[in-house]
């Protein structure tokens, strides 16, 4: 794919919206005990509150996939920021449980749209290693925002921690302002950038790409490669389901787990911040490594290390240090996976939207499952289902990498428009 690039202000807007999402995501864990007490919730009901974010994200990702060829990327990004503002305000001020749940869904709508577009336009606009660098950098900045989230909660007076969500609104508004640098006629949606790059690099006009002319002269070998690619896209989707679930569940339940195993008060208070500090550090480190290493082998290595780190938290809890290690190893998986699927499945229709939808399904399902395990076995068993999900992801990642070494080259352009 030809390197197209994006305006610097748009990149800054992408980074700002990822900071917002990092702040809000990391605030869930420290505030869950307060929310449970204030609204008299069970552990399973609390898990459903955590799942409201990926539930809303699924709807937003599907909507973006359908609208990105009809609506300007600028409007979609700014609309996502508007949902974030509404959801953050609701989470901070909602007096009733049902309104808190609705606000969580609104957060998910903004979160899903921003994730799809902010990551998607970068993955589509740059080559494989450059996009690996930028996506890890951007999502590393998400991790830095997530480190500050629990700190913002902690500095507020007892019982008022939810007001921290209200403070994150300013960053979401800043992101919306920066996205104004993207023209309303911009081709900067993932689908459009991909088509533009393909049409110019292969000598096809945009009109031919839209109509499908010039795409029929494919050899049988290439057609077989595309068909096998559809099975690989399913594998990537399962990979994201495993690791989105792991990331969301680890952040949400780390505090509860450490409190149950008798970790020190400081370790419990800092658990979520340490997890996101490791997440940010892992992604920033992977950004540099990604300039020299292809996404496939980088992702396989980090998934194996992440499974080992999660097993360590279950078998021998080491306080907050264990969750720092989990964040460090799992951090590169999401952005590196986006870079990998974007270029491995460049012929597919909406590959990023597909893996993000399925990934959020995993994020929706696992937190309540962890809550059910806690209800049966106790909170000390919380890392067990998370580690199992991570181990399944390792199997999928290794299979995808082995398949990529045997597969035939796949044409860069989409077959169906």
Image (cartoon, rainbow, N blue to C red):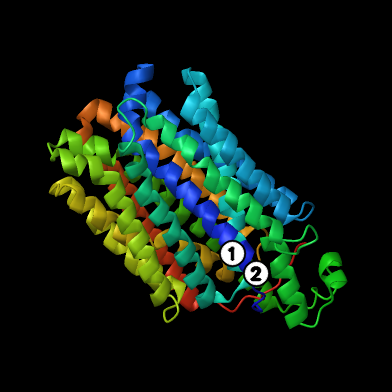
Pointer 2 residue: 6
- The spot of residue 369 in percent (x, y) is 36, 34
254 on left or right of 16? left
Q: Is residue 261 above or below residue 99?
A: below
Pointer 1 residue: 11
Depth check, front residue: 391 or 277 = 277
Q: Residues within 10 Å of mark 1 (few under 14, many from 20)?
A: some
- The spot of residue 121 in percent (x, y) is 63, 63
Q: Is residue 394 above or below residue 311?
A: below
- The spot of residue 167 in percent (x, y) is 47, 39
- Looking at the image, which residue is at 39% across and 49% down? 146
Cα separation, mark 2 vs mark 1, equals 7 Å
Lower sequence index among marks 2 and 1 = 2
- Looking at the image, which residue is at 30% across and 27% down? 158
Look at the numbered disc 1 and give the secondary structure of its residue: helix
> Is residue 414 among the parts visible in the rendering?
no
- Looking at the image, which residue is at 52% across and 62% down? 338
Depth check, front residue: 289 or 274 = 274
- Contact? badges 2 and 1 (CB < 8 Å): yes
Depth check, front residue: 378 or 162 = 162
């Amino acid at each position: 794919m030809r390197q197209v690039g994006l305006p610097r202000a748009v990149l800054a807007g992408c980074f700002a919206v990822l900071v917002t999402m990092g702040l809000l995501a990391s605030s869930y864990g420290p505030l869950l005990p307060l929310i449970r007490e204030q609204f008299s919730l069970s552990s399973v009901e609390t898990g459903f509150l955590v799942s409201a974010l990926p539930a809303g994200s699924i709807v937003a990702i599907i909507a973006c996939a359908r609208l990105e060829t009809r609506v300007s990327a600028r409007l979609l990004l700014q609309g996502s920021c508007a949902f974030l503002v509404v959801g953050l305000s609701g989470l901070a001020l909602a007096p009733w449980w049902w309104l808190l749940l609705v606000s969580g869904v609104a957060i998910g709508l903004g979160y899903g749209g921003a994730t799809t577009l902010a990551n998607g336009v970068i993955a589509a606009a740059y080559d494989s290693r450059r996009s690996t660098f930028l996506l890890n950098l951007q999502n590393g900045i998400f991790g830095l925002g997530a480190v500050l989230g629990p700190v913002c909660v902690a500095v507020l007076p007892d019982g008022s921690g939810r007001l921290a969500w209200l403070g994150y609104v300013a960053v979401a508004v800043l992101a919306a302002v920066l996205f104004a640098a993207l023209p309303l006629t911009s081709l900067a949606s993932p689908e459009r950038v991909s088509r533009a790059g393909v049409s110019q690099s292969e000598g096809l006009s945009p009109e031919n790409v839209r109509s499908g002319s010039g795409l029929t002269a494919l050899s049988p070998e290439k057609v077989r490669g595309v068909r096998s690619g559809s099975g690989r896209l399913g594998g990537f989707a399962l990979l994201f389901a495993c690791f989105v679930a792991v990331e969301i569940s680890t952040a949400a339940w780390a505090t509860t787990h450490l409190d149950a195993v008798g970790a020190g008060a400081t370790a419990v208070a800092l658990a979520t911040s340490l997890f996101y500090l490791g997440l940010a550090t892992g992604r920033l480190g992977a950004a540099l490594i990604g300039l020299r290493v292809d996404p496939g082998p980088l992702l396989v290595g980090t998934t194996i290390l992440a499974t080992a780190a999660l097993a360590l938290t279950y078998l021998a809890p080491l306080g907050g240090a264990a969750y720092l290690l989990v964040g460090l190893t799992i951090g590169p998986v999401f952005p590196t996976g986006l870079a990998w699927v974007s270029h491995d499945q460049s012929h597919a229709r909406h590959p990023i939207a597909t893996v993000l939808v399925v990934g959020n399904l995993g994020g929706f399902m696992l937190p309540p499952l962890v809550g059910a395990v806690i209800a049966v076995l106790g909170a000390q068993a919380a890392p067990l289902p998370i580690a199992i999900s991570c181990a399944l992801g390792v199997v999928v990642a290794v299979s995808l990498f082995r398949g990529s070494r045997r597969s035939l080259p796949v044409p860069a352009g989409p077959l169906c428009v």
